[in-house]
Image: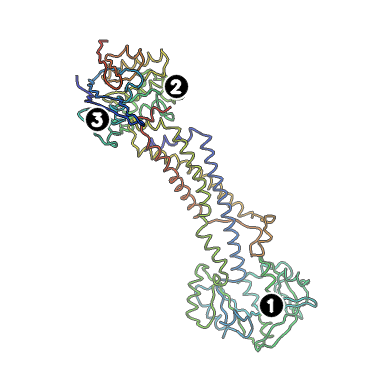
């Protein structure tokens, strides 16, 4: 299997007031194509920082992140915008759809920034919204969708542009059990069908139970890294 | 870019109430500013028309001693010959030779100092439209026993006389001898400036010339130009040609009017601009609030790869769109209001308008504005909006996506 992300000795130190906070300590990990991984750990263990750093939203204090052979740690900010746009899909805890755009416009948005053709965009956006079970809600704005539906649109948006991997920060935290299961079913299916690497940060046992790899962070360091055959 | 425009457009309607409030602020700011500007310009232009067209004319020529001593002995040499020469000038429309000097007007009991203007009634009616200003009596049509005089209505009231009354004019002839002659008031004229009415009486120049014992006397030549804007050029040309004569254009004669008009012409847009500037701070506040309310969303846009330049452009566009709507609406309504009031007139009586007449301003003002004014104002509104949007837009792109997306 092809390696999608490789980190070596990743460290992140925040200078918050008097004390330095070591959010990540020498994290060296590899993620292969098609993995479905949960990053777990108590609050403050560095899950979100890890996702931000490998997602190019934050710079590590030390270490490297190789994606496609390119090191994000040394990339200029202006290049990072473009890199994120072309290689990474994001799903956020609070859905974070653009409220003034309809479901299909939200899903098309990243492809639009990528300057895909209109036909391709529309075809792919419709396909993705069908995949997440929202074929009936193409022209509806987020405010008219339930939390679960909004998060499914967010997943469709993240995957529509065919990124190398998808980062999901606590994607089920705001969802009820049924919506969470629905979402996880969809994500697991898309993970297989699209063969896209998915990395979640979560405390949610429901997510952990579905993951094929679970990495536990404690105080910013890898405490445990287990594979499951599911 | 089309997407950015679309998002910006939809964003401004997210908080409908707030957007409408700021649009209304722009609309009313513009209407208020344009209205006051149009009143000022209208009043000044009316004053210009009254002062220059009804009184001064574009250029006046005198003997170089006449201004200091407005007496019959300071005549323009060969005045009628000069008049004929001036009539050949391609830029000159009308030349009115006059016999003008200071004197006294008296009734049996009352008297007053006046400027006596001997005119050719026919030419004068085309020069200063004196005939059109007559409100009582007639304009040099009577062939009575006494020569006719036209006086201001205000002066007639002061002298407790009226049309048909006999008055006596006293003045010096060409030799400096005192001459008195009786005249009959044939007509009363009215102009805005009460002072002008009290100070100026008109008689037939031929009557006057007989009395001062010089049939060829001309002490003042008033000139009306085909193109009023050429007054400086023509005056300079005449100065070069006729040295020894005092040649003055209307701006020399009434500098306060000239400076008032000049000031308005240059600064009217900026006077309204101050109002727009104030409104722009409101606009800045509105956009800043909307940016601060959308921190998470803006963070997401940048996290997924929307470039900062596009985010910046989006915020600027939102501001510009608000100002375009407000500006378009405000300018259209202002234009309509000014056009309507221009036909109807605005009565300033009761707002101190009566006092204005002392200074040559009419109490009924017809507001007016040049089309270019609206255009310049429109540009100003958009320019201020763009400037006002810079700070909020800068705030937006300074957000750190990783932090912004997690903001509650």
Q: Mark 1 highlights which residue?
A: B203
Task: Look at mark 2 in the image and give the residue it sits on.
Answer: A145
Question: Any mark on residue B255, and which?
Answer: none
B118 relative to B240 in the view: left or right? right
Front position among marks 1 and 3: 3
Nearest the eye: B356 or B55: B356
> Vertical placement of B175 versus B68: above or below?
below
- Chain of the residue under the numbered disc 3 shown in the image: A
Is residue A127 visible to the viewer in this orientation of the structure?
A: no
Which quarter of the image is occupied by the N terminus of chain B? Answer: top left
The location of residue A95, given as percent across then percent down, is 39, 24
In screen coordinates, is A219 left or right of B155? left
Q: CA distance from mark 2 to mark 3?
A: 42 Å
**Image coordinates for residue B226, horizontal then vertical, percent:** 52, 69
> What mark, if any, has residue A62 been given in the picture?
3
Residue closest to the eye, A112 or B323: B323
Residue B166: x %, y % from top left = 78, 77
Kindly indicate the quadrant of the structure image that contains residue B52.
bottom right
Q: Chain of mark 2?
A: A
């Amino acid at each position: 299997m092809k390696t999608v992300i490789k980190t070596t000795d990743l460290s992140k130190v925040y200078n918050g007031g008097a004390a330095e906070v070591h959010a990540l300590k020498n994290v060296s990990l590899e993620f292969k194509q098609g993995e479905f991984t949960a990053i777990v750990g108590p609050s403050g263990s560095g899950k979100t920082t890890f996702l931000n750093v490998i997602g190019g939203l934050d710079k590590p204090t030390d270490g490297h992140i190789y994606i496609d052979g390119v090191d994000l740690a040394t990339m200029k900010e202006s290049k990072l915008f473009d890199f994120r746009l072309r290689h990474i899909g994001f799903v956020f805890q609070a859905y974070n759809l653009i409220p003034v755009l309809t479901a299909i416009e939200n899903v098309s948005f990243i492809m639009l920034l990528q300057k895909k053709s209109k036909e391709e965009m529309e075809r792919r956006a419709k396909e993705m919204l069908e995949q997440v079970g929202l074929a009936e809600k193409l022209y509806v704005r987020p405010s008219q969708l339930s939390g679960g539906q909004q998060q499914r649109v967010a997943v469709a948006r993240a995957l529509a542009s065919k990124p190398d991997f998808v980062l999901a920060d606590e994607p089920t935290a705001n969802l009820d059990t049924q919506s969470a299961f629905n979402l996880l079913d969809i994500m697991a299916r898309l993970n297989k069908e699209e063969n896209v690497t998915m990395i979640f940060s979560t405390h949610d046992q429901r997510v952990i139970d579905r993951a094929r790899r679970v990495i536990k962070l404690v105080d910013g360091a890898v405490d445990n890294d287990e594979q499951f055959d599911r | 870019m089309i997407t950015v425009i679309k998002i910006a457009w939809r964003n401004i309607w997210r908080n409908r109430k707030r957007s409408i409030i700021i649009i209304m602020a722009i609309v009313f700011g513009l209407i208020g500013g344009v209205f006051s500007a149009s009143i000022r310009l209208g009043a000044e232009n009316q004053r210009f028309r009254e002062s220059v067209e009804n009184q001064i004319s574009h250029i006046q020529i005198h003997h170089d001693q006449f201004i200091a001593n407005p007496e019959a002995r300071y005549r323009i040499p060969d005045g009628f010959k000069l008049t004929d020469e001036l009539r050949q000038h391609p830029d000159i429309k009308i030349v009115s030779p006059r016999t003008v000097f200071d004197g006294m007007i008296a009734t049996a009991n009352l008297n007053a100092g006046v400027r006596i203007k001997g005119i050719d009634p026919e030419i004068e009616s085309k020069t200063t439209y004196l005939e059109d200003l007559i409100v009582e009596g007639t304009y040099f049509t009577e062939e009575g026993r006494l020569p006719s005089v036209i006086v201001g209505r205000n002066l007639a009231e002061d002298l407790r006389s009226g049309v048909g009354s006999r008055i006596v004019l006293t003045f010096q002839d060409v030799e400096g001898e005192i001459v008195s002659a009786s005249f009959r008031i044939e007509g009363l004229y009215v102009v805005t400036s009460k002072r002008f009415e009290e100070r100026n009486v008109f008689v037939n120049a031929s009557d006057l010339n007989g009395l001062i014992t010089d049939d060829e006397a001309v002490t003042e030549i008033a000139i009306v130009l085909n193109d009023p804007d050429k007054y400086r050029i023509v005056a300079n040309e005449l100065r070069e040609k006729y040295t020894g004569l005092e040649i003055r254009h209307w701006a020399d004669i009434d500098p306060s009017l000239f400076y008032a008009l000049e000031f308005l012409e240059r600064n009217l847009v900026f006077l309204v601009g101050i109002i727009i500037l104030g409104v722009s701070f409101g606009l800045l506040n509105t956009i800043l609030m909307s940016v601060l309310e959308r921190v998470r969303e803006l963070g997401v846009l940048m996290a997924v790869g929307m470039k900062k330049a596009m985010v910046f452009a989006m915020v600027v566009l939102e501001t510009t769109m608000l100002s375009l709507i407000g500006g378009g609406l405000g300018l259209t309504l202002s234009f309509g209001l000014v056009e309507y009031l221009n036909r109807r007139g605005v009565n300033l009586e009761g707002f101190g308008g009566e006092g204005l007449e002392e200074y040559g301003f009419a109490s009924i003002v017809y507001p007016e504005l040049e089309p270019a004014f609206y255009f310049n104002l429109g540009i100003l509104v958009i320019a201020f909006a763009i400037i006002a949007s810079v700070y909020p837009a800068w705030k937006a792109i300074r957000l750190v996506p990783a932090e912004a997306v997690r903001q509650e």
